[in-house]
Image (cartoon, rainbow, N blue to C red):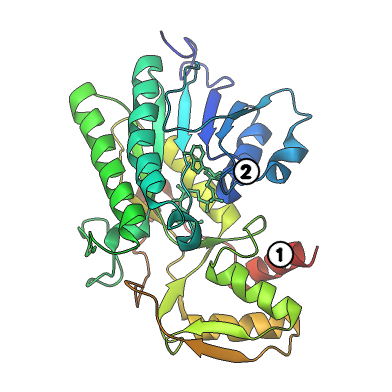
């Protein structure tokens, strides 16, 4: 059955499913889609998502949350699917690695099946982790990656890689409109305070006046994209013509060392925290920076929010 017979023709309200919609990125995406006047169905099993993230959306009659684990099929009628469900921080995805792989792989199969049945467009929230510990810098979409299949991060990296394979195979086999976004480190309000992600960890440690934990000597680099910019990229990718599948890198090409990030957060919070150094965890990539040439040319997209501004908003959230 067709999702919405008028979809596309009149650019009318779309019925949009966001899996992982109660999570950090998902809740911002739901908000953005509701602001654009769409009907939003938010499916989440609340593993790392929180009802508090979407509580402010509940009064909106266009918003409908459903408790659902995407490793099981979901039967709804939709025009678009953003598949974001998957724990994203190492602490959470390594907590139950088998479930992590199931969420990426079986979840993708279920959501692709739903998209096939409803003729919906479907976007996969993939990740820079599919590049593994990259030997190519900055990472371009044509780089096929350097991933350890056996390590503790593999449940996430390989699950996401397999999901990309499934998306492209559904495209080739069934001619579906699929989109793959390779998301690089993103930060902002509603990150969980203790999930080991570097920005939230440092901010919480700085606000509490605790030591800030750096792994290795802190010289590994990351690039941080503010959540609003990332969401804009996802929405633009979904709006591209059916032939545009990606993958497209979405992230901030401005690279800084983890140590510099810690120092900036200490300065921005006015904290007296000291830096302490711990051994590097297994398979932790040493450098990570997206090449966003494709996003610039195909989506007219690039991040707009400066790190200072994004950090200030995120710090204000965590103070609250
Ligand atoms: N935030 C980043 O920097 C980043 C970077 C790369 C990729 N991503 C991807 O973006 C997506 C969202 O990440 P996030 O940062 O918002 O993480 P998050 O953990 O806050 O959100 C993930 C959401 O998915 C839900 N979920 C997990 N397993 C599920 C399942 N089996 N069924 C239904 N819901 C399930 C969680 O409860 C949570 O609400 C993830 O797919 C992640 O891999 C995020």
The secondary element bearing badge 1 is classed as helix
Q: Position of residue 297 (x, y in %)?
A: 35, 52
Drawn side of residue 262 relative to residue 148, left or right: right
Quadrant (top left/top right/bottom left/bottom right) for the C terminus = bottom right
Comparing 260 with 279, the one in front is 279
Quadrant (top left/top right/bottom left/bottom right) for the N terminus = top left
Q: Position of residue 153 (x, y in %)?
A: 35, 61
Comparing 215 with 135, the one in front is 215
User: Which residue is denoted by mark 1 in the rendering?
Assistant: 313
Drawn side of residue 316 relative to residue 156, left or right: right
The secondary element bearing badge 2 is classed as helix
- Give the class, few, some or many, for how many residues have Cα within 10 Å of label 2's Cα (few <14, many ≥20): many
Snapshot quadrant of residue 43: top right
User: Which residue is denoted by mark 2 in the rendering?
Assistant: 27
158 is higher (above) or lower (below) than 118: below
Comparing 37 with 70, the one in front is 70
User: In this orientation, does residue 294 appear?
Assistant: no
Kindly tell me whether mark 2's CB lies below 8 Å from ligand 1: yes
59 is higher (above) or lower (below) than 195: above
Please name the residue shown 54% across and 27% down the image.
16
Comparing marks 1 and 2, which lies closer to the viewer?
Answer: 2
- Give the class, few, some or many, for how many residues have Cα within 10 Å of label 1's Cα (few <14, many ≥20): some
Please name the residue shown 35% across and 38% down the image.
179
Q: Earlier in the sequence, mark 1 or mark 2?
A: 2
Drawn side of residue 160 relative to residue 214, left or right: left
C-beta proximity under 8 Å, tags 1 and 2: no
Please name the residue shown 65% across and 64% down the image.
193
User: In this orientation, does residue 69 appear?
Assistant: yes
Snapshot quadrant of residue 291: bottom left
Q: Position of residue 133 (x, y in %)?
A: 28, 70
């Amino acid at each position: 059955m067709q999702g919405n017979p008028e979809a596309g023709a009149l650019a009318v309200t779309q019925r949009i499913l966001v899996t992982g919609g109660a999570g950090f990125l998902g809740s911002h995406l739901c908000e953005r889609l509701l602001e654009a006047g769409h009907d939003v169905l938010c499916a989440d099993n609340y593993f790392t998502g929180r009802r508090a993230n979407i509580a402010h959306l509940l009064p909106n009659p266009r918003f409908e949350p459903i408790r659902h684990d995407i490793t099981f099929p979901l039967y709804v009628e939709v025009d678009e699917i953003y598949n974001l469900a998957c724990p994203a921080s190492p602490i959470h995805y390594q907590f139950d690695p088998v479930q992590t792989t199931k969420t990426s792989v079986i979840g993708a199969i279920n959501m692709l099946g739903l998209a096939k049945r409803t003729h919906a467009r479907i976007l996969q929230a993939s990740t820079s982790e599919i590049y593994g510990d990259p030997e190519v810098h900055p990472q371009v979409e044509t780089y096929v990656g350097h991933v350890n299949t056996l390590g503790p991060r593999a449940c996430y990296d390989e699950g996401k890689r397999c999901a990309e394979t499934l998306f492209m195979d559904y495209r080739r086999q069934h001619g579906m409109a699929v989109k793959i976004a390779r998301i690089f480190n993103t930060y902002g309000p509603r990150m969980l305070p203790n999930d080991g992600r570097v920005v939230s960890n440092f901010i919480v440690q700085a606000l509490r006046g605790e030591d800030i934990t750096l792994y290795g000597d802190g010289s590994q680099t990351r690039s941080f994209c503010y959540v609003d910019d990332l969401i804009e990229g996802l929405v633009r990718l979904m709006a591209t013509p059916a032939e545009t599948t990606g993958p497209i890198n979405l992230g901030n090409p401005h690279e800084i060392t983890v140590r510099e990030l810690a120092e900036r957060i200490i300065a921005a919070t006015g904290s007296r925290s000291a830096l302490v150094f711990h051994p590097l965890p297994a398979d932790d990539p040493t450098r990570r920076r997206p090449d966003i040439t494709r996003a610039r040319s195909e989506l007219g997209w690039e991040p707009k929010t400066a790190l200072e501004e994004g950090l200030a908003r995120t710090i204000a959230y965590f103070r609250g």
